[in-house]
Image: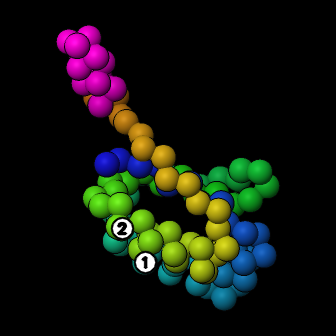
Amino acid sequence: MRVLLTVQMDTEKANKAITANTLAATMKSVFDRIKPEAAYFGAQDGQRTGYIVFDLKEPSDIPTVAEPFFQDLGAKISFIPVMNYDDVQAGLQKFGAS
């Protein structure tokens, strides 16, 4: 299932990770596993935030994705199922057929 992972990093922990040169390693360790379709970064509510779209193969994969962000960055995380344009069109066709 395609999901949007939003990662809001604790400022103090993210600052320490940047200073210690570990932030990139944390991101790479997760990205190597999930192979994101897209990833964008910005600020939300005054915190460094990542918006990452990827295919969540199994719900049991959630801890392997979330824990590095929780433990290394004190992050607030959300997983939201999302669709691309083709998915929406297919869903609307199914709705229209019912």
47 displayed left or right of 95? right
Q: Is residue 97 magenta?
A: yes
In percent of the image, x 60 and y 80: which residue is there? 71
Vertical order, 57 against 44 (above or below): below
Is residue 79 at all visible to an observer of this figure?
Answer: yes
Circle 1: residue type: Ser
* Real-space Cα separation, disc 1 to disc 2, in angstroms: 14 Å
In percent of the image, x 37 and y 54: which residue is there? 54
Front-most of residues 33 and 39: 33
Vertical order, 6 against 88 (above or below): below
SS of the residue under disc 2:
helix
Q: What segment carries the magenta color?
A: 87-98
Vertical order, 73 against 8 (above or below): below
9 displayed left or right of 64? right
Circle 2: residue type: Asp
**Residue that numbered label 2 is attached to:** 61
Name the spot of residue 90 as percent of width and height, x first: 24, 24
